[in-house]
Amino acid sequence: MSSVRTRFAPSPTGFLHVGGLRTALYNYLFAKKENGSFILRIEDTDRSRKVEGAMENLIDTLHWAGVEFDEGPGKEGNFGPYIQSQRLSLYQRYAHQLVEEGKAYYCFCTPERLEEIRRKQIAAKISASYDRHCRAFTKEEAEKRRKTGEPFVIRMKVPLEGELTFTDIIRGDVTIAYKILDDQVILKSDGYPTYHLAVVVDDHLMKISHVIRGEEWLPSTPKHVLLYKYFGWEIPQFAHLPLLLNPDKSKLSKRQGDVAVEDYRLKGYLREALVNFVAFLGWNPGDEREIFSLEELIREFSLERVGKSGAVFNTEKLDWMNFEHLRRKPDAEVLCMVKEKLMLSEFNTTHFSDAYLLSVISAMRERVTFVKDFIEKSPYFFRAPLHYDADTVKKRWQKDSPSYLKKLAEEFSVLESPTKESYETALHRAAESLHIKNSDLIHPLRLAVSGMGAGPGLYDIIVILGKDETVRRMNSAIEKVPAIAGFQQ
């Protein structure tokens, strides 16, 4: 195969798993790095597991992540259709071809017989597998039973002796003895193929050069290689990605947390951060760099730098990456995102100018992990405090705080076009005239204007709020906080 062609072939059974996103991403990065094509194929032959709308969600999620396919549903190329249920006649033709060539056979065993075999094998403590009962039928006998309408499946004939070796880009040479392989069903009684036949037929006909998929498919690969050999087709290169693990090293599963990309979208993670994080689940650039754009990942990615060991899904690392990507975004882009969040919040975004919101962004940028944090961590920029933090009141509000703030409000009121420096000078002047420490004014002032005990620089807050709003909030706190603190006015 001269040109690189990779594919992501999910089943439409629900939301896209983060492991699925990683598989899609690695296939995309490798194809783009090699100036090749990335294909999306929908493997929907297991009709019992199909979820309505799942394919559309998969496509939408890949688009959100920036992992755009070159060919697939809605982007028809020269190798479609790209939905397996629309390709049934192909699989049936190739399955019967293998029977004709003596490389597969009709199996008429009933589900009851198969279950009885399995039960006996388990009781005897041997590995459960098909006993090859129908493999012994002559071609004439099998054809006669098929023509009478007896239900059948088609099984591939696995050699009874010897072994098979294939090369995996990540794991090196892998050797499997034929004796541990089952005579796999490749075409079911309803005419639908199993994964093993469909994936080989499709990868060949779609000219897939590299099969990059999860480690869970490694045990099935010898069966696929054997089918390639039976058909006389060129075998693609394989690369099996390491498992995704929880922090306790168990396999990543829904039981221990969110596993769908949709979950992380809803929580407010930036696509750049999630893609960056997922790229590092098994791969690294070989140096200390960790923050990458999608374009940078394309330039740097190589399958040779993908490891064999399981990759731990650490949400703390994901949070850090989200912080870093958000911090690097230009103000104009962050402004658009903040305005969008404000529209969905209790605050009326029309009350705030772009200049005002940009000043809020500047003050909070180093303190937020998510876009929503600009609002949720600093609601005081969008309305006067409705409540005052009880712990801060207890620790920072003194009996004389109201009189102190009255004096400070007088100092602020006479300022004209005040700056951070003039506010600070006025506070120092008030503290000196009251014979108190600056902190005796700073702490109750922060509480008055924000309702909180921590946040960005105090003078940054009051410059953004403006003199009139700051004085208004100070007077409001003078009236309300003493009762909360337990002081009589």
Image: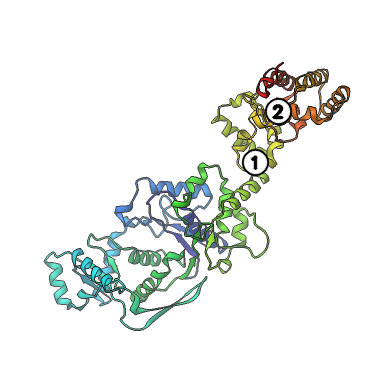
Relative to 335, say whether 135 is above or below.
below
For the residues labelled 1 and 2, the Cα–Cα distance comes to 20 Å
Q: Which residue is mark 2?
A: 447
Residue 261: where, in percent of width, then height? 49, 49
Nearest the viewer among 353 and 161 is 161
Q: Nearer the viewer, mark 1 or mark 2?
A: 2
The quadrant in which residue 478 appears is: top right
One can see residue 102 in this view = yes
Nearest the viewer among 107 and 118 is 118
Nearest the viewer among 407 and 229 is 407
One can see residue 35 in this view = no
**Mark 2: which secondary structure?**
helix
Q: Which residue is mark 1?
A: 368
- Residue at the (20%, 78%) spot, across then down: 136
- Residue at the (68%, 24%) spot, across then down: 485
Residue 234: where, in percent of width, then height? 41, 74
Nearest the viewer among 167 and 399 is 399
Residue 57: where, in percent of width, then height? 43, 46
**Mark 1: which secondary structure?**
loop
Is 193 on the left or on the right of 110, as rendered?
right
The quadrant in which residue 178 appears is: bottom left
> Which amino acid does the dot numbered 1 rest on?
Val
- Residue at the (17%, 64%) spot, across then down: 151
> Which amino acid does the dot numbered 2 rest on?
Leu
